[in-house]
Image: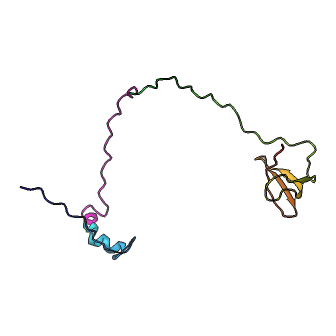
């Protein structure tokens, strides 16, 4: 006997447009007969206990070893610290912005934020400008 031809699965809820079905969620609940399953189990859907996964075997050694010794990268002990501020820069000091959209503009230094950014104010009120010294 020849094997049966598989027919394409057809949804009970035909799409009107992509992502929107003809029937509502509640209509489909009844069409699928979920109400009967819920009623049969005393008002809640049947729950199955999760199947215990078999223990994973001990990790096998790799099948591939590189021909040359691969150097292990050195550990980076660098801890990010806030940018040190020049002693001459105090609140109220007039600074000139060196880079960015407002380069060449004079601004007034207000304070240094915990992240290291400088909070400034000026003609364009350009706050939080990263102060870079070359």
Residue, far front: 67
Color style of the picture = rainbow
Can you give x and y, in whole percent of width and height, for residue 108 in the image?
90, 56
Horizontal side of 127 relative to 69 (left or right) equals right
**Part of the protein shown in magenta:** 37-61
Q: At 79% across and 55% down in the image, what residue appears?
A: 100
Q: In the rendered view, does 52 fall on the left or right side of 70? A: left
Q: Judge left or right: residue 78 versus residue 118.
A: left
Residue at 62% across / 28% down in the picture? 74
Q: Which quarter of the rendered picture does the C terminus lie within? A: top right
**How far across and down, in percent of the image, does residue 63 sit?**
38, 27
Residue 39 magenta-drawn? Answer: yes
The stretch drawn in magenta includes residue 33: no
> On screen, 82 above or below 103?
above
Along the viewing direction, whichever of 80 and 36 lies nearer the viewer: 80
| x, y percent for residue 106 | 90, 57
Instruction: Give me the residue at 91% from left, 51% from top.
Output: 91
């Amino acid at each position: 006997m020849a094997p049966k031809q598989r027919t394409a699965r057809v949804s009970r809820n035909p799409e009107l447009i992509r992502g929107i079905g003809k029937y509502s969620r509640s209509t489909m609940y009844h069409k699928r007969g979920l109400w009967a399953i819920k009623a049969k189990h005393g008002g809640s859907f049947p729950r199955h206990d999760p199947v215990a996964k078999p223990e994973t075997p001990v990790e096998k050694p790799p099948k591939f070893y590189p021909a040359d010794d691969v150097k292990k990268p050195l550990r980076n002990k660098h801890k990010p610290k806030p940018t040190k501020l020049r002693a001459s820069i105090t609140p109220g000091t007039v600074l000139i912005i060196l880079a960015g959209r407002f380069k060449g503009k004079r601004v007034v230094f207000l304070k240094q934020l915990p992240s290291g950014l400088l909070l400034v104010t000026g003609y364009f009120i350009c706050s939080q400008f990263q102060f870079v010294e070359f």
